[in-house]
Image: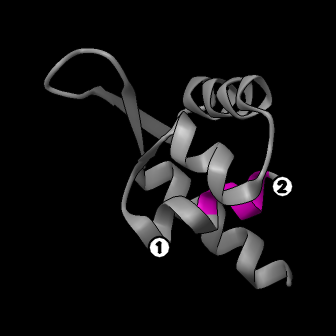
Amino acid sequence: MDKQDLLEHLMQVGGADAIEVAQTFRAPYPAVAMMLLRLLRQGLLARYQDEDAVRFWYELTPKGVARLRYFRRLS
């Protein structure tokens, strides 16, 4: 899983939490959580808490969508 893979996944599903992403990519939860945090700090993701305030959900920001389009042009 790299940055483009994660951005593509979030674009497809509209938003996800770290557990769902870890399961989807069969990756260790700590690695996924760290990657999501890095993308959040880069402004590529927005983070929201669910109603019971247990998990954070991540969605692409406009900057994240632009970065994904950039990656797609390179492919």
Is residue 6 within the magenta segment? yes
Residues under labels 2 and 1: Cα distance?
15 Å
Mark 1 lies on a secondary structure that is helix
Q: Is residue 3 left or right of residue 37?
A: right
Q: Is residue 26 above or below residue 53?
A: below
Asked if residue 5 can be seen in this view, the reply is yes
Q: Residue placed at 47% from the left, 73% from the top?
A: 12
The residue carrying mark 1 is: 12
The residue singled out by tag 2 in the image is 1
Query: Which residue is rendered at x = 84% and y = 53% of the image?
Result: 2
Amino acid type, residue under disc 2 in the picture: Met
19, above or below 1, in the image = above
Nearest the camera: 42 or 59? 59
| Image position, residue 13 (x, y; %) | 42, 66
Image quarter where the N terminus lies is: bottom right
Pick the residue in front: 2 or 75: 2
- Above or below, comparing residue 14 to residue 29 in the picture: below
Q: Which residues are magenta?
A: 3-7
Please report whichever mark, 2 or 1, sits nearer to the chain's N-terminal start: 2
Identity of the residue drawn at 75% across and 62% down: 4
The three-letter amino acid code for the residue at tag 1 is Gln
